[in-house]
Amino acid sequence: MRDIRYQIAVDRKPDDALSREASEIEVQQTIEGPTTFRIKFAVDICRGDFDLIDDARLNPSDKDTLLTVTAYLDGEGEVLAHGVITERKLNLAEGGPGSSLEIVGQDRRVVMNRQLPPKGATTHEGRASDIAASILQSHGFETDVEASDFTYTEDKAAKKQNGTDLALLNELAGHTGFRFWIDWEVAGGLTGFDVKEIAHFKSSPPRPTKAPFGVRPPSLLAPSGAPELKLNAGGGCSNVASFELHTNAEAPNKSGPVNRVNEDDGSVAEGEVAGPDTNQLGGQAPAPSQPRERSLATAGGAEEARERTQAAVNDASWSVQATAETSAQALKAFVAPHQIIRVSGAGRLNSGDYFVKAVTHTVDSVAHKMRIELLRNALGG
């Protein structure tokens, strides 16, 4: 039996009392948005237990309170969530147990989404990755940024920022086919630690350095030691409570013409984009293999139009979606978005490597359950 423990820290300071009194923890992690958390504490108002209720740290205010949830598996720490408290919910039940305090929050994207640029639109020039790195560094993150191809210049439509920093980062990620996410590393043990925030702006999973254009991308394999979801293993070796899979045969697998609309005269210039350039997760292309074409119209330059179309085709290529339910106790590991993990015992077509899209962690006194959403762009192990 693996040893699993949890620690809650407020403003990077471990709080043993909060860690003990948490009755339920839920963390939602995804490749498409912020990591959110919800922590529930049981309180007994009949005994005059108002310490948690009156704790100013747990009440959202002008001074952001940073809260960290760390899980330790055999002493190895994994930060499940680190962010700002945004909501506080209080339920008081007279005459007995049932009262509770609940705090809700999300990662520091919420801070990046508060303020508009001064005096309306701000103009940026340079590669999308350079613009992203500058914004992330201004918010105090350590950065992991992949160089993008397209460069915004004055003669190539400099990038205008009309919305918040978060809105611009999401827009740049969508145009380049990258993803923007935040994760954390923890140093130290149960009695003290330091959290390092890392902001990523890059392709995930990694793509080939150059688009293979007409050549099937190489297969991307789960790393050695990656968690494995085992179905129908027998002998008590299965570690999955349920597994559901859906394949969309009409998902786009090829780009049609790239339609670049000239803003001056309304004329349309066409170009070509290869099929998805994401690495294959699977041993064969999903059936059917007949073309399912999609095209994109944009008022930007031809180079920008090709990049945006490639990103759209890549995103649409994830035609296989699955959901698995397991627990950290059964899997003997924690799972996080952006990982590649393996599924076995689901048959020849459905077993193999999958990309983790989202994980919902639900922790109570009984178990640490994980609901894992998976993606794939091919079938076969």
Image (spheres, helix red, strand yellow):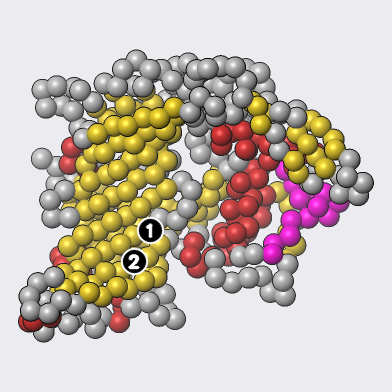
Res. 36 mark:
1
Magenta region includes residue 35: no
Q: In what element is the residue under mark 1?
A: strand
- Residue 107's x, y, as percent? 42, 61
Give the crowd class for mark 2: few <14, some 14-19, many >=20 residues within 10 Å. Answer: many
Magenta region includes residue 154: yes
Viewer-side residue, 287 vs 65: 287
Viewer-side residue, 380 vs 5: 380
Q: Is residue 157 left or right of residue 320?
A: right
Residue at coordinates 15% horizontally, 76% vertically from top-left? 93
- Which of the 4 quarters of the picture holds residue 114? bottom right
Res. 129 mark:
none
Pointer 2 or 1: first along the chain: 1
Q: CA distance from mark 2 to mark 1?
A: 8 Å
- Residue 349's x, y, as percent? 38, 17
Where are the magenta residues, as a range? 149-162
Residue at coordinates 9% horizontally, 72% vertically from top-left? 97
Q: Is residue 151 left or right of residue 45?
A: right
- Which of the 4 quarters of the picture holds residue 87? bottom left
Q: Which residue is mark 2?
A: 104
Viewer-side residue, 338 vs 98: 98
Residue at coordinates 66% horizontally, 70% vertically from top-left? 117
| Residue 34 versus residue 234 in the image, above or below | below
Under mark 2, the amino acid is: Val
| Residue 110 versus residue 34 in the image, above or below | below
- Residue 278's x, y, as percent? 56, 29
- Whether pointer 2 and pointer 1 mark residues with C-beta atoms closer than 8 Å, the reply is yes
Residue that extends furthest to the right in the rendered view of this protein: 265
Residue at coordinates 59% horizontally, 72% vertically from top-left? 115
Give the crowd class for mark 1: few <14, some 14-19, many >=20 residues within 10 Å. Answer: many
Say which quadrant the N terminus sits in. top left
- Residue 313's x, y, as percent? 61, 33
